[in-house]
Amino acid sequence: MTHVLKFGGTSLADAKKITFVSKIIEEKSKIKKTAVVLSAPATITNSLEKVIQLSLIKDKNYKKEIENIKNKFYTIVQDIYKNNKKFLLKKIIKKINHEILFLKNTSKNIYLLNQCSDYIFAQVISRGEILSTQIMKNILFTKGHSVKLINPVKNILAEGNILDSYVNISKSIRKIQKINFLKNSIILMPGFIAGNKKKELVLLGRNGSDYSAAILSACIKSKLCEIWTDVDGILTCDPKIVPNAKIIKKISYKNIMEISNLGAKVLHPKTIYPLEKFNIPCYIKNTFNKNFIGTKISNYKNKKIKNIYPNIAYIEDINIFIIKTLNPKNINKIYKNLLKINKKNSIILFLSINLIHIPSINVYFKEKNFKKIDFIIKNLIFNKEKIYKKKIYKKISIISIIQNKLNKKRIIQNLNQILYDLNIKTMFDLQNFSNNSISLIIKSKYQNQIINLLHEKIINNYKIIQIFLFGIGGIGKTLIKQIHREKISLKKKNIVIKICLISNSNKILFQKNGIKINTWKKKFNTITTKYLKEKFLINKIKKIIKKNNFINPSIVDCTSSNELSKKYLYFIKNKFNIITANKKFNTGNMIDYKNIRKKTYTNNKKFFYETNVGGGLPIIQTIQNLKQTGDKLISFKGILSGSLSFIFGKLEEKILFSDAIKQAKKKGLTEPDPREDLSGLDVARKLLIIAREFGYSLELKDIKIKKILPQLCNSNINIQKFLQETKNFNRYFLKKIKIAKKNCKKIKFIGKISNTGKCTVQLEEVDIKDPLYEIKNGENALSFYTKYYQPMPLVIRGYGAGKKVTASGVLSDLLKTVV
Ligand code: ASP
């Protein structure tokens, strides 16, 4: 039983790697009879091609390029034999010199004659393979192995284009089988090369050594072909675009063919045919991770590999011609005609017919073939009728998802969602260029972003949330910490939150692919561009939104900015969800209030504001649930301010009013200026939001606020002075508490909605039966008397302020955008 191993250029890039490869060959040859196909060391084929190109344009630098090639081979062999075996080094240097001399003479002729036939071209650029095989032969020979070299020019018979030939497998089998292989010898063959009928050296196309390996496998009836490269196997996507691409462990011949045709550079496309025809399983393995199993390509029945990952392949720099005729009935015939023309030169990648509007054909091809295709189409005449080339699209990419038993419905849903979120239009309908694939035609500039998102969605199954965070006070900062802390547990639930933008009132930190949470503060502090007005800052953010595309983006508003809240509608229209702890929008005018709800619905976006009332307590959600199930509010009563709950709780403990305020401020429960809490405006806002949620059409001015303080205090004085002046109210509150206590009641600052919808905010005495009686220490309590909840009300009680609970409420709103 024989197996074939093929090593690519990166596996043979230097002496160390070549030696390492020789060890793999030795190990394998101990187990089974081994045949080896080798590429040229990395970059050599390109350098050889460059020598020809430079000679052709009479650029003397071709000599330098030859020197580079010579030096590269010298370094390789000198490193291999650096310690001993000088005579072996001499022997191999002689071989290198021989090839370099050939190179010098040939390129000189090309330089002088200004021409290079395909035959000469093939001779020159195959030198890399010839030399790497010689080097390997010597290494194995020195280690005592018997080595049999196969000359592909004599034994692999190829037909067609000299530079991109096809092998006649049956004739090659006959030739190879005539060779007498010694039982224990290792077989070596340079890849990329074959011979034509005239026994001239021909090539199998760039990267053709894979094909050589498949052919040799077929010729020597190998039971296994291993392609050794520099990646762990076939990946779900190009790792240059998706660094965390996954390995596809098993794949069928059919699928691999589709993947190659749709752009994945996994194997030379011609390689599959001989493997499939002779049913030879093939492994893609990593030379630098040799014990990893790799990817197995085989004749899998659909059932066996149902659960493997799909592959995302792409082809960039595509041009598209759309061609039409005067007589649309001819379209099918023209299509066949184009297929026929393409059979000869295969420069058209795909053809598709659009029959929906005016029948037309899309011709997809690589930019570099523009002139040739243009010529073909210009000369295409059908039934004496000229064909019209309607439109040319340039810089297009084809992104394809390929999988056995592809769940097309799921893929289409995901694709549409991504396009919708990114606000990107496809050029044409989704295409089926093969049985097990769906392809998206898109402007190349969107390619990488779409591929990444697709990979996250359909392979990693991630739900992505991108956020723009406004406000980095207590709540904003805590939110960032919570997101960071929950990162791993969210990832387990397949949720990934990326903070793309952080802003306060004058600075912006933006990182399209997500700001690193560990270092955000440092980065933020180094930003020197400051926006003098919030308006300018928002304009800058609008520019960022226009320039970039985001996936499931959310505005997270942890400010109390009016200016920002006025932009919510703009954000919704630009496909952002809004998550806000800021009450300004929901207490603005009723027209905007209704409008945003309509627009959120029509744009299929979310507007969540659970933290507008009661911090993280589930208030808004509860009201919406009640309403949805037909409940109706009769009346409402609640302690809606954490700071006032704290202050009036302290008064019951005989603490003076002025001291209670100071304590509340110290605990961070009040606004920076406690007058804002004491004004009752914040409670009025919350009450308005509750009333509106129950369906009342009210404005802020409709909420009656009965002032807490018995007289107006001077609003011109600073906070410190004000705090001192609060002493003047100590006696007033002591008296109030005393009177209430006499009647077994307590004083609370309450927001109320009456059964007629009248909303008031005021100090009120409550008795022991009232659910608000015990509320203190910053707790909130809300009691709803409704059609369903009476005579006992529905009561929600808990801490309704504080950065941790509020930030967690914001986070929970955020997570609702992906469920
Ligand atoms: N050395 C050739 C090339 O670079 C063939 C191969 O490596 O497969 O195209």
Image (spheres, rainbow, N blue to C red):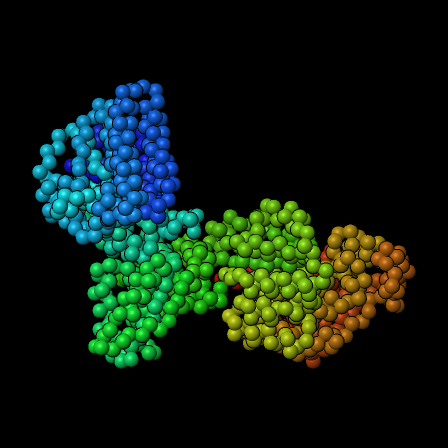
In the image, what residue occupies the spot 64% across and 59% down?
Answer: 470
Q: Name above or below for residue 226 compared with residue 640.
A: above
- Left or right of residue 511, residue 368 in this image: left
* Residue 616 location (% of width, % of height): 63, 59
Q: Quadrant of residue 152?
A: top left
- From this viewpoint, is residue 448 visible? yes
- From this viewpoint, is residue 204 visible? no
Between 275 and 325, the one nearer to me in the picture: 325
Between 221 and 588, the one nearer to me in the picture: 221
* Residue 766 location (% of width, % of height): 76, 67
Between 708 and 748, the one nearer to me in the picture: 708
Q: Quadrant of residue 140?
A: top left
- Left or right of residue 211, residue 66 in this image: right
In the image, what residue occupies the spot 57% across and 56% down?
Answer: 500
Q: Quadrant of residue 648?
A: bottom right
Residue at the outermost front position: 112
In the image, what residue occupies the spot 25% across and 25% down?
Answer: 91
- Left or right of residue 91, residue 782 in this image: right
In the image, what residue occupies the spot 55% across and 68% down?
Answer: 574
* Residue 698 location (% of width, % of height): 69, 77
Quadrant showing the N terminus? top left
Between 494 and 124, the one nearer to me in the picture: 124
User: Across the whole image, how many numbered discs are drawn on residues?
Assistant: 0
